[in-house]
Image: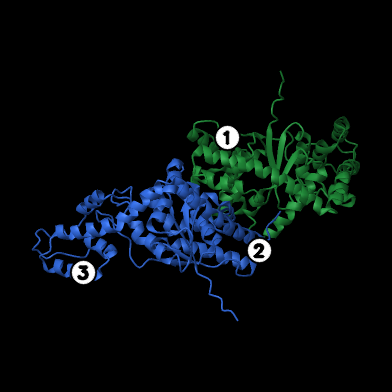
Chain colours: A green, B blue
């Protein structure tokens, strides 16, 4: 009697291809993906179609960054032999499922989605949002279900999108009378979002407060120099605050020696530890982290055919998976099939 | 020196597959399609995906009627050797272009579309419309442009949908800096919409006032019996009104002898022509028209494989055309291409 291994849980995640990835992505998602890729069946979607929903005026940038983000994936250690790296716009089944799911969700429901609401407000778009942007929760439901993903790593602010997906899943399952599609669960990272070097909550390239994965040692040093510490900590001998001190947030996120960091925190609190020494340590930690990534990145970028091969292989694999789901959904709903 | 024939103008039209077609379709579109199919490059889209935008609760009905409508096409004389008959949901490039075009149109613009506005109001749906229904003008733009159609036969009430298509076309052409896609022109039929047998403006199966193309002689007679004439025309000897008299509207639409109809109108106006005689003539005209269609329909329905073959061949042809347009659009916009 043979004992089969239980199937690995399926993870779908990915990135909008609006720019190369940075340290915030590394802390919040990339390193988790590297850690999970062997114990899970993981697919990474280069979400160019989703990036177009608010970048239709500049599609060339979105296209260029497909390669940049894929290069980032490989540079941080995503192994394309176990993780499927694929291009969203090259998977027609996703567009077909999106179009279908849009019939199972009302305009009012899309407008109530907190993630969409916040983003519309933040951009001051009102009703002049592109229709594709309003509809992207349905597209995301298509992505998640097409891969039959049950785990979707997202930030806390994106959890409502998983709920929207599950509503569509439940609606379809109810209509066909069986569990056609699995519900998905948000996998919210334990580590909160990494702040920008200026202390702002969100690190972003457009915000000018990001450290790209390709940063040189000099760029790393300059970024750490700019970093926000404790404004009340004027002399090294003064007691300093650890909470809200960006340098400590980064040390917590990246220093491989947490005990040493704990000792530094105690020292900083009681006074006698200068910002300069602290920043020297962080700069060293980040150089050690990003140096090898930068080198692998440069090596990969010298061979663009290799990245294209990875994308072709991964996308072909994803095409088979997503087309099978589309077929199953069409069949279960009783749609016309040629 | 050889002189090439100018290319035939491209027509795209079709029907939502919500039910078998009826006499209203025959008068308003089917016979035009038969007449135009040799002088034009014509494609007929069995619009099952569009029909789902407000029928997602009953996809089986939409699927069943793909075959019914295709059978109607063949029965009235559409020649699949010259007209491409194809299934919308089996053309993934249409979904892909729809998703793309949704980024080039705002929610506000979709909501302003008079056709959508009227239909939302007529159905009392408010914001609880399915998102797919709000978005269908973008899907229609995908249909029209994917076939590079320049002529789109539509009722007058649907002309705003062509304008929406052309707005997207102009926006794309402007962005890429050349005429990537042609604008389309609405081809509005000279003959107005055929009223229902009860005199209501629109003939529809759900309205219970339609004559299906498969009607038997007895059903034709019964439908003509129910027909609205002139309520003031109580005795045959009374003068009668021709305007608004449904029997005359139908004779105008279908009687092969317009001079005889003109003489009947004069006779009816001055009195002495009874409704019974008039209705006998119309019943004869409709029996002559629908008899052969009904017989061909029955013959075709006996061989379902033949209809499936027609759909497979036409859809394969349409798949090549629509995929080529999708490729051209993606390339011109500079989207990522594997």
Residue denoted by label 1: A181
Q: Say whether residue B38 is left or right of residue B282.
A: right
Q: Which mark is residue A116?
A: none
Residue A209 percent coordinates (x, y): 77, 50
Report, in whole angstroms, how far the alpha carbon at label 3 lies from the one at label 2.
58 Å
Report, in whole angstroms, how far the alpha carbon at label 3 lies from the one at label 1.
64 Å
Q: Residues within 10 Å of mark 1 (few under 14, many from 20)?
A: many
Q: Say whether residue B193 is left or right of residue B79.
A: left
Secondary element at image label 2: helix
Residue depicted at 56% across the width and 79% down the height: B3
Secondary element at image label 3: helix
Residue depicted at 53% across the width and 41% down the height: A330
Q: Say whether residue B56 is left or right of residue A238.
A: left
Residue A165 percent coordinates (x, y): 58, 39
Residue denoted by label 2: B332
Residue depicted at 57% across the width and 36% down the height: A166
Residue denoted by label 3: B260
Q: Which of label 3 and label 2 is nearer to you?
A: 3
Q: Which of label 3 and label 1 is nearer to you?
A: 3
Residue depicted at 78% across the width and 45% down the height: A73
Q: Residues within 10 Å of mark 3 (few under 14, many from 20)?
A: few
Frontmost residue, B283 versus A221: B283
Give the quarter of the image for residue A62.
bottom right
How many marks can you see? 3
Q: Chain of mark 2?
A: B
Residue A205 visible in the displayed image:
no
């Amino acid at each position: 009697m043979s004992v089969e291994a239980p199937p690995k849980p399926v993870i779908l995640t990915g990135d909008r291809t609006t720019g190369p990835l940075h340290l915030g992505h590394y802390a919040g998602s990339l390193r988790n993906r590297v850690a999970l890729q062997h114990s899970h069946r993981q697919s990474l979607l280069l979400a160019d179609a989703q990036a177009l929903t608010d970048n239709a005026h500049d599609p060339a940038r979105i296209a260029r960054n497909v390669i940049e983000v894929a290069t980032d994936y490989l540079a941080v250690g995503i192994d394309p032999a176990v993780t499927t790296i694929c291009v969203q716009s090259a998977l027609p089944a996703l567009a077909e499922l999106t179009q279908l799911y849009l019939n199972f969700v009302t305009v009012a429901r899309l407008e109530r989605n907190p993630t969409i609401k916040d983003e519309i407000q933040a951009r001051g778009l009102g009703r002049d949002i592109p229709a594709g942007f309003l509809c992207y929760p349905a597209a995301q439901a298509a992505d998640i279900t097409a891969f039959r993903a049950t785990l979707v790593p997202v930030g806390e602010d994106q959890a409502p999108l998983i709920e929207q997906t599950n509503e569509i899943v439940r609606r379809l399952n109810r209509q066909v009378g069986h569990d056609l599609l699995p519900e998905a669960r948000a996998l919210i990272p334990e580590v909160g979002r990494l702040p920008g070097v200026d202390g702002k909550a969100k690190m972003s390239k457009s915000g000018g407060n990001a450290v790209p994965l390709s940063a040189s040692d000099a760029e790393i040093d300059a970024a750490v120099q700019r970093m926000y510490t404790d404004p009340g900590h004027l002399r090294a001998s003064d007691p300093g605050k650890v909470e809200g001190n960006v340098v400590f947030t980064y040390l917590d996120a990246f220093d491989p020696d947490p005990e040493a960091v704990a000792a530094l925190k105690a020292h900083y609190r009681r006074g006698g530890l200068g910002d300069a020494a602290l920043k020297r340590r962080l700069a060293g930690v980040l150089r050690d982290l990003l140096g090898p990534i930068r080198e692998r990145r440069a090596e990969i970028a010298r061979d663009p055919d290799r990245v294209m091969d990875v994308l072709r292989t991964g996308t072909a694999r994803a095409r088979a998976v997503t087309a099978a789901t589309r077929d199953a959904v069409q069949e279960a709903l009783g749609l016309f099939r040629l």
